Image: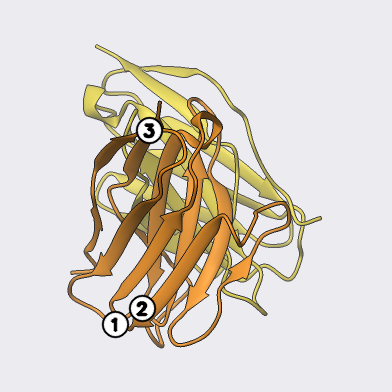
Amino acid sequence: QKEVEQNSGPLSVPEGAIASLNCTYSDRGSQSFFWYRQYSGKSPELIMSIYSNGDKEDGRFTAQLNKASQYVSLLIRDSQPSDSATYLCAVNSGGNEKLTFGTGTRLTIIP
Amino acid sequence: GAVVSQHPSRVICKSGTSVKIECRSLDFQATTMFWYRQFPKKSLMLMATSNEGSKATYEQGVEKDKFLINHASLTLSTLTVTSAHPEDSSFYICSARAAGGPYEQFFGPGTRLTVL
């Protein structure tokens, strides 16, 4: 059973601080990693993808991947109230096109 | 780029009727589309994987005769919920993967189905 684990939260972060979201996965053959943001009542929106070890930055978002530790994280700098949402970690293990999603971490940015 | 639309966004129907949901990739060709269902405060549940021109692959526990999927072109997939019942009420979301692209999926806005 391929699993993706996330802390369900809620995670509360003061506005302007750094929010750190974590995800672990069980399949060592995993090759592609994604972070989606889902607002309440809406569908998921892709915000970051990462394929190799290290950091990948895009604006206020940084994805970090450590394949040896089977760990992927998302950092949100200068957190804004509009960042309040559920963040889904998704992993593709290769061999088929499906993504395995974590259950999501609910993030609340406190003004 | 990478825009996926769904229609309708919301539908209310009587028990026993069938409902068709359309999923379109607007600015890219999608050889593969996916259909998910999400209950309130629950995680996404993959229902089926749909490839253009071939039969859909359903996840374990999903009734293929109840949830009919057709992927007639590289930009359109449809999900028909047949003989809908109140327990089918849910948020149905499609996603698409670009032909030849990486494994990232782009999601449509979702369809909220309420069966009375």
Label 2 with label 1: CB-CB less than 8 Å: yes
Left-right relation of A10 to A4: left
- Residue A96: quarter of image: bottom right
Badge number at residue B14: 3
Q: Which color was chain B given? A: orange
Q: Callout 1 environment at 10 Å: few (<14), some (14 to 19), or many (20+)?
A: some
Residue A23 location in percent, x, y?
61, 43
Residue with the mark numbered 1: B29
Q: How has the structure been colored for display?
A: by chain
Residue nearest the observer in this picture, A106 or B21:
B21
Subunit ID for the residue under disc 3: B
Structural distance between the alpha carbons of marks 2 and 3: 36 Å
User: What residue is drawn where x is 53% and y is 57%?
Assistant: B67
The yellow one among the chains is: A
Residue B111 lies, with reference to residue B49, above or below; the image says above
Residue B92 location in percent, x, y?
42, 46
The amino acid on which the numbered mark 3 sits, given as a three-letter code, is Lys
Q: Callout 3 environment at 10 Å: few (<14), some (14 to 19), or many (20+)?
A: some
The amino acid on which the numbered mark 2 sits, given as a three-letter code, is Ala
First reached walking from the N terminus: tag 2 or tag 3: 3
Residue B97 lies, with reference to residue A55, above or below; the image says below
Subunit ID for the residue under disc 2: B
Q: Is residue A18 among the parts visible in the rendering? A: no
* Helix, strand or loop status at disc 2: loop
Structural distance between the alpha carbons of marks 1 and 3: 35 Å
First reached walking from the N terminus: tag 1 or tag 3: 3
Label 1 with label 3: CB-CB less than 8 Å: no
Left-right relation of A4 to A72: right
Badge number at residue B98: 2
